[in-house]
Each structure stands twice: as C-alpha cells, then as structure tokens.
Image (spheres, rainbow, N blue to C red):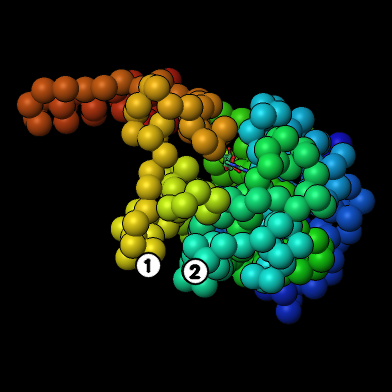
Amino acid sequence: MDTQILKIASIFENPDELQQAADILARGGLVAFPTETVYGLGANGLDEEAVRSIYQAKGRPSDNPLILHIAKKEAIEQLTTGLNANAKKLMEHFWPGPLTLIVNKSAIVPDAVSAGLETVAVRFPSNKFAQDFIRACDCPIAAPSANISGRPSPTNAQDVLEDMQGKIAGMLDGGNCGIGLESTVVDTTSAVPTILRPGGITYEMLTEVMGAVEIDPALQGDKNFKPKAPGMKYRHYAPKASLTIVEGKTDAVVAKINELAAQEKQAGGCAG
Ligand code: AMP
Ligand code: MG
C-alpha cells in the first residue's frame, strides 16, 4: 500500500489536502494526524472494520481499547449514556487539551473501540490540525499513537513513517507535536475521579480544580492491583537502542558516558 503524505500548513492554505485525508478515512482507510500530544493513527470511530484495522497496523493487543477524538464538547453526548458532574467539570476546565475521559459508552460505540468494556475513552484535542481534520471527517476518530505497539510514540511525520509507511493509506503532515507526552486518562465513572494513566495534565492540575483525585493503585507499583487502563500493563516507549546505567562519582560518570557515546558514534548508532 502507498502511504499518501498530505502536508498541511493551515486549513486556509490546504483545504484540499485536509479533504483528501478525510476522504481516505471515509473509505475506511487509516490516516495518521498530529495532535498536541503525539501523532495519532486515525480511523472512523464508528466503523467497526476500520477500527479493527488499527489494531492490525500497530500490532496492538485487541484487549487495549482506543480513544475517540472529537472536535466539540457536545460530540461526547452521542458516545455516552450520560455524563456526571465530575465529567462535566473536567470537560469544562481541561477541554480542549491532553485529557482523556473514561465515560459509560452508548450503543453506537463499536466493541472494537472499547475492547469489549462498557466504558469508552473520549478526548477533545487542542491541536488545530487535529480539530480541522476531525471536523472535515464529521465523525469521532478512533486513534492510538501512530507507532508499532511497544515502540516510542511519534511526535513528527518522519517518525510516523518509520513505523507506518506502507501500512496506512494516508498521513497529514502538520509538523511537530507540542507536548510529546500522552494524554492523561481519568476515569469519571468512579465516585472520585481516578487517574488511570499519567500524562500532559498533571495530578496537581486536576486536584486544583476537582479537589479529591485518586490514582489507580496499580500505577503506584502495587502488584495486588490490575491496571484499570488495559494499556498500562503493556511495555511502552521501547526505543531500538541499548541502555547502559552508569553509576559513580560525577567525573567518572561523565568520562564513561563520553566513552560510550564515542563508541556508538563509531558504530554509526545514536548515543542515548
Ligand atoms: P493510547 O494507547 O496512547 O491510545 O492510550 C489509550 C490508553 O487509554 C490506553 O492505556 C488504554 O488502555 C486506555 N483506555 C482506553 N479506553 C479505556 C477504557 N474504556 N477504560 C480504561 N482505559 C481505557
Ligand atoms: Mg500509545
């Protein structure tokens, strides 16, 4: 498969590129696109078959649900059976932005999105290209990060292509992502909002607005608990590089790091 690369500088300069990307998605194809966190790998979130092809392209375990991306707050209403006061307050303060909310899902959300759970993850990104793309598609976009599962999340078009060229129908190239860190996932279905994955919106930012906020005990290393976000049990951010931990006095550590970097350079790799 040829991956069509569509460069976009702004919606005013590139309405055709945006429309082409939306057309690919409408045909059931996968399109990578920038958000303020990382590049997403998007499919029509209401098209079960298209959503399934995301898992295939990424090699993503099928029990790891996806986030639905929307471009206006009201769009969450059709995806859920109802929003409680906590969910509404979080949306009010942090949307658009790097905060994903877990809510009870409605019947229109395909099982492939929620990996069979009764809840669904929803986010309204602040990145303008992401918003323009979602609007052009006129549907919620299911999108995990645009990398092969287990590898680092891409923050620019080149990194997306490294993992996805030939596997996806299109990519909107909108330059670098701002944050480079994934969205914070917060479960709003529990009595107290609970962080299931740390990310761009911090615990402090959340408590300032919400008062009490809990953290999934599994994130704090308690082996008696299974992570509530299925994705947290899998390996993340595994770059194709060796890692050496250097301990000792500062001078000795610096000398050793310089020595290792020189060896890497000679071998044609990248240090770090
Ligand atoms: P990503 O793989 O970067 O798209 O991140 C999505 C994260 O949200 C993963 O850790 C998923 O397991 C988690 N997630 C998505 N949907 C749900 C859900 N309904 N309940 C709990 N966690 C979810
Ligand atoms: Mg990811």
Quadrant holding the C terminus: top left
Mark identifier at residue 209: 1
Answer above or below: position of 165 versus 191: above
Q: In the structure shown, which secondary structural element does the residue marked by tag 2 occupy?
A: helix
Q: CA distance from mark 2 to mark 1?
A: 8 Å
Decide if residue 160 is in sight here.
Answer: no
Q: In the structure shown, which secondary structural element does the residue marked by tag 1 occupy?
A: helix
* Residue at point 92%, 51% (across, down): 27
Quadrant holding the N terminus: top right
Callout 1, which amino acid?
A: Val
Dot 1 crowding, Cα within 10 Å, few <14, some 14–19, many 20+: few
Residue situated furthest bottom in the rendering: 12
**Rendered-image quarter of ligand 2:** top right
Decide if residue 75 is in sight here.
Answer: yes
Picture quadrant where residue 83 is located: bottom right
- Residue under label 2: 89
Answer above or below: position of 4 versus 248: below
Dot 2 crowding, Cα within 10 Å, few <14, some 14–19, many 20+: some
Position in image of residue 101 (x %, y %)? 56, 55
Q: Looking at the image, which is closer to me, 95 or 210? A: 210
Callout 2, which amino acid?
A: Lys
Q: Is the CB atom of the residue marked by disc 2 within 8 angstroms of ligand 1's nearest atom?
A: no
* Residue at point 26%, 22% (across, down): 245
Query: Would residue 260 appear left or right of 110 to someone viewing this image?
Result: left
Query: Would residue 257 appear left or right of 187 to someone viewing this image?
Result: left
* Residue at point 61%, 53% (across, down): 103
* Residue at point 72%, 74% (across, down): 11
Mark identifier at residue 68: none
Q: Looking at the image, which is closer to me, 4 or 185? A: 185
